[in-house]
Image (cartoon, rainbow, N blue to C red):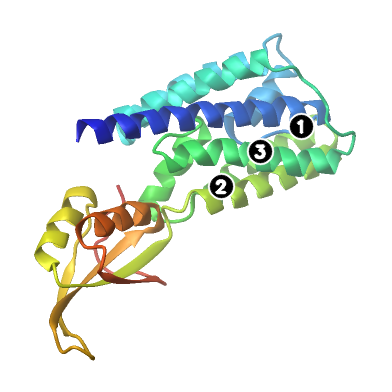
């Protein structure tokens, strides 16, 4: 158990480091050279950096301090610590990497910058962390309403588009909107906690499998008696509704306990009744 926990912590730290590097690369290689603004507090830091003598990285760190306190209270200590580590590493990489333009085409910069930023934000989210700032606010709102995180990224970031249009060239605001849209779509593709799945597991070892699932996946299970159509052997169907985020862990449990179990996974259109969102 301790070994598994150590492996998970190592994976999370790697995800945080990789995510921070992608965030910094997307900014310094695509968005900052093209004067296109990113999503979240990163975009806010970019805007403020144009009027105050502080770098984007330093401003990003300062802006995240009050949000880190909110995350500590609403989401959890571990999540907040890893998120703040991500912010600190992003600041470090922003200062380390040079601002260098790959292409003079502003549309290419807006699209590829948005994709790289989304990868940088989505990887930490998938491993139980975030890139801080509006990520934490969007995650809190997503858990409350059970809607995709990307919707809140797009909604909360509309203020960045309006601000960039008022302070700078209105055309740049449109390119910023392109970046925000690309970022929100890619994040939803990576971070899939809002997608619900129903797993129907046909097994002869229902008791052992139920106990193992409850140890590693905190979801309710419905047990349905079943009989093999060909062999007439008595079996059980364990029906469980999970998020796509939990599918990998469920597969591991089934493989460890009953690799011969037959499992059917279907996407769930909607849920009525209690479903744990934490």
Spatial CA span between label 1 and label 3: 9 Å
Q: Quadrant of residue 162?
A: top right
Spatial CA span between label 2 and label 1: 18 Å
Q: Which residue is mark 3?
A: 116
Residue at the far right in the pictured view: 104
In this orientation, which residue lies closer to the viewer: 8 or 147? 8
Q: Which residue is mark 2?
A: 187
Q: Tell me if I can see residue 37 in this picture.
A: yes
Q: Are marks 2 and 3 in contact (CB under 8 Å)?
A: no
Residue 69 vertical placement versus 275 (above, below):
above
Q: Are marks 1 and 3 in contact (CB under 8 Å)?
A: yes
Residue 221 position within the rendered picture, expressed as x and y whole percent measured from the top left: 18, 65
Tell me: 55 left or right of 166: left
Quadrant of the frame with the N terminus: top left
Residue 155 position within the rendered picture, expressed as x and y whole percent measured from the top left: 58, 47
Residue 227 vertical placement versus 123 (above, below):
below
Tell me: 20 left or right of 74: right
Mark 2 / mark 1, whichever is N-terminal: 1
- Kindly identify which numbered label has been placed on residue 30: 1
Q: Residues within 10 Å of mark 2 (few under 14, many from 20)?
A: many
- Kindly identify which numbered label has been placed on residue 200: none
Name the residue: 80% across, 22% down.
100
Q: Quadrant of residue 114?
A: top right
In this orientation, which residue lies closer to the viewer: 139 or 169? 139
Q: Quadrant of residue 174?
A: top right
Name the residue: 23% across, 90% down.
230
In this orientation, which residue lies closer to the viewer: 220 or 211? 211
- The number of numbered discs placed on residues in the rendered structure image is 3
In this orientation, which residue lies closer to the viewer: 163 or 75? 75
SS at circle 2: helix
């Amino acid at each position: 158990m301790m070994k598994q926990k150590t492996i998970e912590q190592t994976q999370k730290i790697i995800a945080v480091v990789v995510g921070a590097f992608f965030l910094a690369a997307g900014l310094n290689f695509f968005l900052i050279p093209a004067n296109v603004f990113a999503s979240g507090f990163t975009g806010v830091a970019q805007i403020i950096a144009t009027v105050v003598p502080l770098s984007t990285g330093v401003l990003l760190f300062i802006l995240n301090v009050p949000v880190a306190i909110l995350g500590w209270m609403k989401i959890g200590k571990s999540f907040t610590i890893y998120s703040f580590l991500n912010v600190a590493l992003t600041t470090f990489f922003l200062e380390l990497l040079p601002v260098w333009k790959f292409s003079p085409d502003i549309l290419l910069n807006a699209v590829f910058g948005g994709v790289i930023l989304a990868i940088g934000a989505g990887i930490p989210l998938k491993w139980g962390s975030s890139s801080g700032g509006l990520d934490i606010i969007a995650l809190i709102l997503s858990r409350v309403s059970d809607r995709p995180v990307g919707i809140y990224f797009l909604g909360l970031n509309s203020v960045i588009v309006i601000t960039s249009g008022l302070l700078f060239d209105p055309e740049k605001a449109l390119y910023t909107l392109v970046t925000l849209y690309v970022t929100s779509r890619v994040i939803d593709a990576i971070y899939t906690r809002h997608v619900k799945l129903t797993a129907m597991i046909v097994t002869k070892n229902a008791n052992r499998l139920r106990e193992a699932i409850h140890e590693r996946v905190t979801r309710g299970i419905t047990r349905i008696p079943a009989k093999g159509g060909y062999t007439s052997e008595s079996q059980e169907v364990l029906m469980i509704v999970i998020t796509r985020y939990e599918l990998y862990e469920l597969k591991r449990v089934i493989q460890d306990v009953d690799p011969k179990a037959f499992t059917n996974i279907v996407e769930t259109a909607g849920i009525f009744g209690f479903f744990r969102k934490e």
